[in-house]
Image (tube, helix red, strand yellow):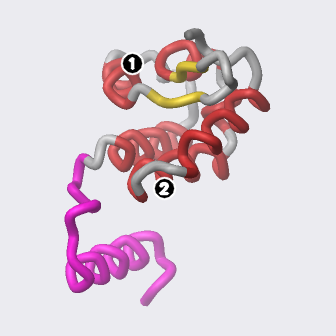
Amino acid sequence: MSAPTSTTSAVIGLRRWARGHSPHVTAAVGLLIVHGTWPARPEFRDACVERDRDGTCWIDWTAARAAFDAGAFAKASTSEIAVLDLAIALGQDRFRLSRMGPVNARAITDSVAYALGILR
């Protein structure tokens, strides 16, 4: 196993992994792919993305958090750092979103939408 050497191989491999995974991991990987920055950064891939011989890639969320907390990604912009922090939290299920019932899930969804200025 090794880190993927290109953005394309990382994105394809992460999509393959996320396809059959839990919703919180799928959401985290989807956020990183749509945002685009992190799969393209070699320091991110080297720190926490593994690639199997069949091309499947996965993120070691513990390694991602450790590298993040150690400042390994400090050269990124403020918004890039924020997106990565959120994606890691989602991937680790830090806020236990996977265990929320529909009422709490809706309250959280609405609160995040308000925080982003989408709902008023």
Q: Is residue 79 left or right of residue 100?
A: right
- What residue lies at 22% left-to-right and 54% top-to-bottom? 95
In this rendering, the answer to whether 106 lies above or below 45 is: below
Is disc 2 in contact with disc 1, using a CB cutoff of under 8 Å? Answer: no
- Label 2 or label 1, whichever lies nearer to me, is 2
Say whether residue 8 is magenta: no
Residue under numbered circle 1: 67
- What residue lies at 45% left-to-right and 16% top-to-bottom? 72
Residue reaching furthest bottom? 120
Q: Residues within 10 Å of mark 2 (few under 14, many from 20)?
A: some
Q: Which quadrant would residue 111 be assigned to in this image?
A: bottom left
Q: Nearer the viewer, residue 55 or 8?
A: 55
Secondary-structure class at tag 1: helix
Can you give x and y, in whole percent of width and height, for residue 16 in the image? 63, 42
Can you give x and y, in whole percent of width and height, for residue 60 in the image? 41, 26
Q: Nearer the viewer, residue 87 or 56?
A: 56
